[in-house]
Image (tube, helix red, strand yellow):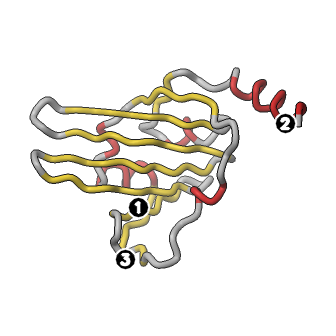
Amino acid sequence: MGIYFAYFYWQSNRLPKILRITSYDSIKVIPPAICHFSWSNGDGGMIEGDMHVVNGITRFDYIVKIVSKSTSVHMVVTQEGTAFAWNEGAHQGIRGRYEDIAVQTGLSNVEAVPCSTWWVPDAMKLFVPQDVTFL
């Protein structure tokens, strides 16, 4: 158990305090991390959520608010950079390159996020749902 936490402590020293998320290449190489982000355009639009990364796989869970309408968005990105995104409760989603899907889902407005070590990663968060069809 001590070796496990020593390894994660060593990895946590490699984790940047602020991570640029405009390209998936910078995300997939970090050690297990939890990141929280928030962005606002000043006109009532905002994006706020969390990102979990382990072994090059990433899960985003965030809210996109435009004026008075809020949408809960989820996205899983594979090690190769293929993104699967869907709205809460939807049975259809979109799939494609991370950078393209980030533009379509509003995530591209967030350029950098603060991160901390994900000490006990939960791989169950990283699965693409089976009840959603991705186009």
| Numbered badge on residue 91 | 3
Query: At x 36% / y 75%, what residue is drawn?
Result: 92
| Picture coordinates of residue 114, whole percent (x, y) | 47, 26
Q: Nearer the viewer, mark 1 or mark 2?
A: 2
* CA–CA distance in space, label 3 to label 2: 38 Å
Which residue is tagged 2?
Answer: 4
Residue 26 vertical position relative to residue 122 in the rendered view, above or below: above
Q: What x and y, as percent, mark residue 77? A: 52, 55
Q: Of the numbered discs in the image, which one, if any, rests on residue 85?
A: 1
Q: Looking at the picture, which amino acid does disc 3 mark?
A: His
CB within 8 Å, label 1 to label 2: no
Q: Quadrant of residue 13?
A: top right
Question: Would you call the spot at circle 1 few (<14 residues within 10 Å), some (14-19), or many (20 or more)?
Answer: many
Q: Secondary structure at mark 2?
A: helix
Q: Count residues near mark 2 (Cα–Cα under 10 Å), then give few for <14, some for 14-19, many for 20+.
A: few
Residue at 34%, 70% in the rendered image = 89
Q: Quadrant of the N terminus?
A: top right
Mark on residue 110? none
Where is residue 11 drawn, in percent x and y? 74, 28
Element at badge 1?
Answer: strand
Q: Where, by quadrant of the figure, is residue 10 drawn?
A: top right
Three-letter residue code for mark 2: Tyr
Asked whether, in this view, residue 36 is left or right of residue 34, the answer is left
